[in-house]
Image (cartoon, coloured by chain):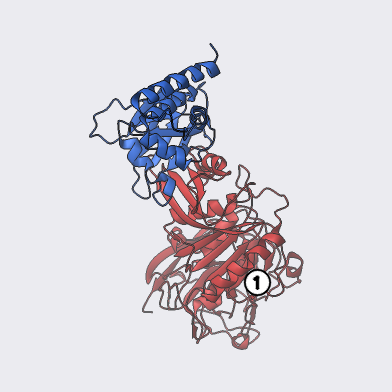
Amino acid sequence: MRVCVIIPTTDGPAAIMRLVRLHKAPLSVMRTQDDYRALPPSPRYHEFTQPGGPLRKFLTLPDDRFELRVAARIESGRSWELPVALAHWLEAEGHELVSEDPDLVVWATGALDNDLKIIPQNYHLEQKLSGSMESLAEYQEQGSGILLLPPELIEPPSHFDSDSVSLQVVQGLTQAIGVIAEAFVVVEPDGRIDAAPKVHGKSVKRTNWLWVSLTAVALVLGGALAVPRLINLSPAQPADESGFGALPITENDPAPDNGGAEQETAILSTPAPLLEEDIDDGEPGAETLDQREAVSLVALESPPLRSTVPRLVLDYAPEGASCPDVLFGTTAPRTEYRTATDDGYGRVSPLELCAVGVQHSADADHTLELLPPDELERHVLSADWQGGRALEPGGVAMFRLRAAVPVDFAGHWTFEGSSNGSMDVSFELFSAQ
Amino acid sequence: MTVRSDLQQSAFAALQEMRGEGGVDSTAPRSISASRIVAYARRENTVSDLTIERALKEQPGLRRLYLSALSRSAIASSPLAAAASEAKLTERFVGEYQIEIFEEEEGPPWLVVRIPEDAVEVSTMELRRPDGTGQRLNLGQPVDGVLQLPLDPDFEELVDVLELLNDPMTAIHLI
């Protein structure tokens, strides 16, 4: 993917134009396109990227030095460190760093400590954003997606066109990378990964669609990340509730007692703005602001379980929608349930399957330790993959699928801690049921 | 004898030599004074005086005066490379300072000057051929004892530098 990384300065934006590996020269150098002499931060850049330096503790970089060429002078300070670190990560991941015609523009700022967390200080964010507006507007005109990653919440200028722009507050390199990495995920109904998908029936030149619901993706970043403050500058579409009246019941499910169920995903269908204090609305399942748990503990008023074995929960894209729509919260999934039998959960159709998980019985009086199938890990968004986790009575653990769902997959869900001891329940995906 | 008087002696001797060679018409007004030549050699910046540069190419006496003044004021000098003339320079020593040129897979070659520990820091390099052509280059600030510059032909002042460096007859002075 073609990515433009912008280093905002108080004198205007400095886009990274090139990042070249130097195999023989002993120093890494930062310079502009207009001068062969190194910029004042160049010694720090060398120290930052050299073996043993802060960046290499986190990124696996080749044993090279680098020439970093930027579009404008950077005279002082260290706020270039976060965007430069992101540029190195992007380059190492095989993306192309460009200053013209990018698919994605990343605007970030922040000096980094030895743990690659942003050092709190005054970054003159409003001035920097204001100074970048003209550049960002030009990229927008060209159809590039814009991702702003400030270290604290800022109010964009009132004239800022919010279409195709998303803002995510980040506190360090790891979090910033997570936001960008998730933004690259696109899943088509047939499992293809598409870098230029359609949005609501309208073709777009670039990945503008990413930004409609990036909020939802950012919320479910995994790892020990602090809950970010978010502004989704493109409001999410309201969740489609028309399918909530009665869930399709598979042959293995017991008849529902209440004639239907209503599912709410506490986070994924909530439109922006979304701040920490907005989330705890008392709905069952929305018990914590922790990102992973907010996804896991989904409120499901569903037919009660009659077995102590957790049941399988399958989120499919409803008719007329796709998994990206579900993934980014613009539409609610069509959920199916499977109760375990002697043959396990049986065979499941992978067609338009967006997420798979398990739900513990609400009647249970114990907590289970869940170990999902190891083979599932590479198919699941990294934010959701945690390995083992605890399942409280009534709790749900969902795993959103990353890309092409395997059409021939078999694994076991392991539940430990019940009176029956450890339980292994088989689970299979096959293209033909 | 002080450095200044030493230079003045050199200047006087060179001037006499120039007059003897007919390089200077003793009856005609001098175009460039010796003191101006010496001052140009001892300047700290890299700005070229085109009049003097032309004179250095055209007037051997002035050239000798200049090179003498330059050698005396430089931290380290190497009159010519101890290498086969056909070979491209990849490494050369100027006093205890190591000069290298690295060709990379992508982009221009890089000039590297390594400053030995405890040695005086240098910031400027002057390259001068016997015919008087040459270039003075700002090397920037060292990092970990290393000065590094891209010999990027997009910059006019660097166009001739690589050619000068690869010429074993080029004298290198570190200032």
Viewer-side residue, A292 vs A116: A116
* Neighbourhood count class around disc 1 (C-alpha, 10 Å): few under 14, some 14–19, many 20 upward: many
Q: What residue type is labelled 1?
A: Asn
Q: Position of residue A75 (x, y in %)?
A: 61, 48
Q: Which chain carries label 1?
A: A
Residue occupying image coordinates x 51% and y 64%: A381
Instruction: Say if residue A245 shows up in the picture.
Output: no
Task: Give above or below for A331 relative to A103.
Answer: below
Q: What secondary structure is marked by label 1?
A: loop
Q: Quadrant of the C terminus of chain A?
A: bottom left
Viewer-side residue, A321 vs B23: B23
Colour for chain A in the figure:
red
Q: Is B135 on the left or on the right of A172, as rendered?
A: left
Q: In which quarter of the image is the N terminus of chain A?
A: bottom left
Q: Is B101 on the left or on the right of A169, as rendered?
A: left
Q: Position of residue A259 (x, y in %)?
A: 63, 87
Q: Position of residue A407 (x, y in %)?
A: 37, 72
Q: In the figure, the blue chain has which letter?
A: B
Viewer-side residue, A184 vs A112: A112
Residue A258, by quadrant, is: bottom right
Viewer-side residue, A386 vs B99: B99
Q: Name the residue under label 1.
A: A232
